[in-house]
Image (tube, grey):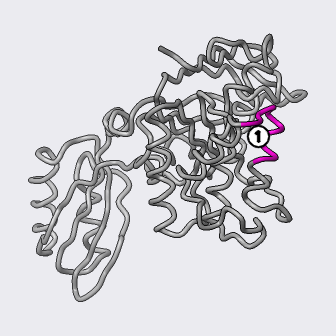
Amino acid sequence: MSMIEVEDLRKNYGAFRALRGVDFTVDTGEILGFLGPNGAGKTTTMKILTGFLNPTAGRAVVAGHNVLEDSVEVRRRIGYLPENTPLYDDMTVKEYLRYCGRLRRMGGTWLADRIATVVGMTALHPKYRAPIKTLSKGYRQRVGIAQALLHEPEIIILDEPTVGLDPNQVVDVRSLIREVGEHRTVIICSHILPEVEATCGRVVIIHEGVIVANGSAEVLKSEHSARTMFDVSARGEVDDLVVAVGNVSGVAGVAATGHAGGLASVRFESALGELDMGPAVTNAVSGAGLQLVSMVPQRASLEDIFRSLTQVEES
């Protein structure tokens, strides 16, 4: 069952078309990675989903509620962590969470119980009575996640949840996101691709206001691996290796990648597989008087796919 449905979503700012017919769904209990370069439409899409921005055209439904017709009900069902969490440094963690709860009209036993629950989930006990201004980046991020979870939302939207965290903090936040995702729908907006790949079951990539990829990391790698990348090493001069490999039929984009200790290395792309390219490259390298050491195919990473799909804007 879809918790979020987005159909032909469009948003214009004057003549600029920020969203140009965005379509995607997010299932109940799914952890979705929403990726895109700066200016691609990520923030605009999230603002529409959270009810803070009206679309020019199209339809967005959150937990059965249309964002245009019932934005208040939509907001009740969403917990949101913006990239720069709006914390109040003069408050303690306890005071801040109580303040957030009251803004959402929570109170009494319900608020007290929920604060205790989210403090436990985010491991904030050691800093519960500490002023927010004294907290590290990692603890500040935990406070932001705690406020997003406070009112028991069905959907959590996290914008760059691991930016600025050290490796140990990243592991902790990743574990927390997975725990949250067991019972809720989660959308993670991020540019840290390995983090998204490690956490999210599915990835949506938006570029220039259009969805350009939608699927699991493994599916995207399979779909976008029509061209295989190879790393070749041989004993000899790197310029000779570039020429030898470049003359092989089916080879494209040969580039030198290193030359040390008499070992030259190049990388190239081909639409052909290893069984087709192996003999031809071996013969070409040997024919140039070089000694082939290795030829290793490299499967496209999520970062490779992201760059290939957004290269116009990134160039």
The chief SS type of the magenta part is helix
Residue extending farthest to the bottom is: 261
Q: In the image, what residue type sits under mark 1?
A: Gly
Q: Nearer the viewer, residue 314 or 218?
A: 218
**Relative image position of residue 171 (x, y in whole percent):** 44, 60
Residue 101 drawn in magenta: yes
Q: Nearer the viewer, residue 46 or 111?
A: 111
**Residue for badge 1:** 101
Instruction: Please give left or right for residue 102 compared with residue 135 in the image.
Output: right
**Residue range of the region highlighted in magenta in the rendering:** 98-108
- Residue shown at 30%/67% (left/top)? 266
**Relative image position of residue 36 (x, y in whole percent):** 60, 42
**Relative image position of residue 314 (x, y in whole percent):** 62, 51
Q: Nearer the viewer, residue 37 or 85?
A: 85
Q: Residues within 10 Å of mark 1 (few under 14, many from 20)?
A: many
Instruction: Please give left or right for residue 173 compared with residue 12 in the image.
Output: left
Q: Give the vertical position of 235 relative to 241 (above or below).
A: below
Residue extending farthest to the front is: 109
Residue extending farthest to the right is: 14
Instruction: Please give left or right for residue 84 compared with residue 206 in the image.
Output: right
